[in-house]
Image (tube, helix red, strand yellow):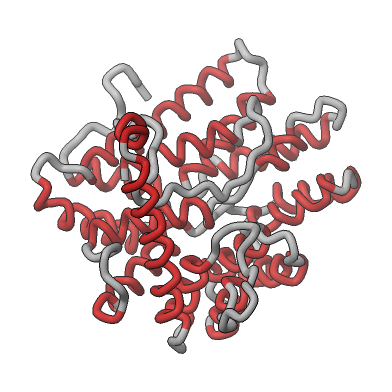
Amino acid sequence: MVKRCLLVLALAANHSPAASAVGAHGAVTPGSATPGAAMPAMATRHPKPAAVTTNRYQTWRAEAAAILGARADANSLATAAALRFTGPAYGAKSAGASPKPSALELAARAGELAPQDASIGWLNLQLCSGTPACDIRDVATVMRWVDADNGAAWLQTLAAAQKDRDTTEVDRILADMAHGERFDLYWNRIVVLMVDVLGTAHDQLPGGFAASDSARLTTVSEIASGEVIPSFSSLVDVCRDSSAGAERRDLCLKLSKTMQRSDTIAAQLVGFSIERRLLAPDSREARTIAERKRLLEWRMAAAAKFDNPLLPWTKNARARARIAEMRAIPREEDVCIAILRQHKMALDPPEVHP
């Protein structure tokens, strides 16, 4: 989960108001270098083992997706979709290859079996938005129908309007987003769903990856970081447009406060960044936002340390403990707080005084 912590911070930094637009489908695969890890030098000296590990991992994903995709329950199909998705070029079929359901087809089937499951609807929408040939309109409409109070359900539609430079539509969508009571990405629910599926089907899946509780949590978190967390670039761009006027600024401020209560830390961090960008840099409000953002980052990093214990044989127990908290608690930040309390740790760094 330290790796997950680094991924979240990197995503939030890339989608902050000071950053340029980037995509969200950059998940780290097992065997690849991670920012802050002591791996680049080793990878430089021994490039072939890393490449072999990556190839084996992709083979494992394809085989696991085929096995789970043959099942008839929504959770297995959703997990198969996440495993099969490989980015914008997914679904390209080589000549003579036996036809296999695409990631979108698997996600759509999962949605049909569980039409009221917002987490599966969100995964379906994310996979569609990451595929150039997919029209998001119907999928986004279904998502908003399933979870009408979630402002995040408009995010991909906002990106389409912003790309078309339709300022009237951008303002209308932004207003709908700002009226949402929540801004949720269903991180805990999707990770737990996939971990449960991989655990239940462990005996039928190929070996080599996701063979233990700790490995399953790590593997699923890396996949979900690339497929569950959206790109916030369009939202950041429309909210920092200085020519948009006071009405849009007010909508962005309102939305940013909702994002700060999101169920996913990445969305919270972007919400803090948007609000801070709209405030005077030297104002008391801006300083308060900076402190709250720093506190959230500290809690995430502090809780992640318990996922990598000094005694390696306790890793699976720690993973099961985190998964249990994720199953019971919808918000990612609240899981971090629960883990810190479980280990009788302070909830604030020493120099932060609420």
Residue at 22% across / 60% down in the picture?
A: 320
- Depth order, front residue of 100/269: 100
Q: Is residue 115 visible?
A: no
What residue is rendered at 58% in x and 64% in y?
122
Which residue is the extreme one toward the top?
282
The mark total stands at 0
Find residue 102 and report its image quarter.
bottom right
Q: Quadrant of the N terminus?
A: top left
Q: Position of residue 150 (x, y in %)?
A: 62, 58
Q: Is residue 75 visible?
A: yes
Percent from the top left, x then y, of residue 167?
A: 89, 43
Q: Nearer the viewer, residue 244 or 204?
A: 204
Vertical arrangement, residue 12 with respect to residue 72, above or below? above
Instruction: Residue lying at the far bottom in this picture: please name it.
Output: 72
Viewport quadrant of the C terminus = top left
What x and y, as percent, mark residue 128? 66, 64
